[in-house]
Structure formats: C-alpha cells, structure tokens
Amino acid sequence: MTGLVALLNTFNLTTPGGWVLARVAGCEVRRREPGWEATGYGWRFPHAGAFTVGSVVISRTPLVDLVWEHECAHMRQYALLGPLFLPGYALAAAYSLWRTGDWWSRNVFERRAGLVAGGYVENPVRRGSKRISGVTAAGAAGA
C-alpha cells in the first residue's frame, strides 16, 4: 500500500508540487518512509507545525513519530483525491472554523488523520444563536 500511495501521488502531480514548494522555501529534503520530510520551512503560511503536499511533509523542524504518522494519513488522502485534496481541505477547514472557531476540530481530513496525533486539541461545536432557515446552526436540536 505504501508504494501505491507514493506512485499515485507522483502521477497525480501532488508530490512533484510538494518537492517544488519545499525547494523554493529553502527546505532540506530527505527520504523518510513512506515519503519525504522537508525541514527548515520558514514561511508564515500556512501557520502549522507541519503540512503535507502529496508525499512530501514540510515542517519547520524534524517531526516526532506520532506527528509523522498523522502526516502519512494525509499522504493517503492525497492519493485518493489528488489535486482535489487542496480545495476539499479548504472547504473542510472553513466548515470547522464556522462550527468551532478553529480550522481543525470539525475538519474531516484532520479528524480522519487523528487530531491528537497531529497535536490538535478538539474544541466543541458552537451552539450559539446562528440560525439557518429557522433552525439553529447546531441542527434540529435547537428548533
């Protein structure tokens, strides 16, 4: 399965994109199964300890094993979605921000990769006064 993920991410061009980004950002790239780890990332965006593009994990410093496993889950997500991962992730992050005030707690990609493994603390869903079509944002329970 590991080789298949790397192969799919190469053919869907997300790994080459990750390599280009890592090189332009001045990262040092080294092989770390099942992908590549690029360290030394200094740009402000995205504001995260690490992020994945294809099978390339880009971070400021080397990752501990638990976080690496979390990022490997994102590699598998890229293998399934290819370049569509990025807009899908953006939509999931926006939904989470709307529901919880952060971009990870209700982000399906982060949840499936493991929030705790990624270093995230889950925040509760907001149950405020936001209403959509006569129903609270939390759903029918508030109607």
Image (cartoon, helix red, strand yellow):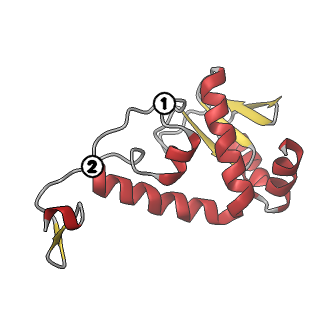
Q: Is residue 89 left or right of residue 27?
A: left
Q: Position of residue 114 (x, y in %)?
A: 54, 38
**In the rendered view, would you say 130 is above or below 47?**
below
Marks 2 & 1, CB-CB < 8 Å contact: no
Which residue is at the front of the view, 36 or 100?
Answer: 100
Secondary structure at badge 1 equals: loop
Q: Give the labeled residue for mark 1.
A: 116
Q: Is residue 35 left or right of residue 53?
A: right
Q: Position of residue 25 (x, y in %)?
A: 65, 40
Quarter of the image containing the C terminus? bottom left
Q: In the current view of this chain or complex, which residue is farthest to the front?
A: 141
Secondary structure at badge 2 equals: loop
Residue at image coords 10%, 60%: 129
Res. 63 in view: no
Res. 120 in view: yes
Q: Amino acid at mark 1?
A: Val
Q: Amino acid at mark 2?
A: Val
Q: In the current view of this chain or complex, which residue is farthest to the bottom?
A: 133
Residue at image coords 54%, 65%: 87
Q: Give the labeled residue for mark 2.
A: 125
Q: Residues within 10 Å of mark 2 (few under 14, many from 20)?
A: some
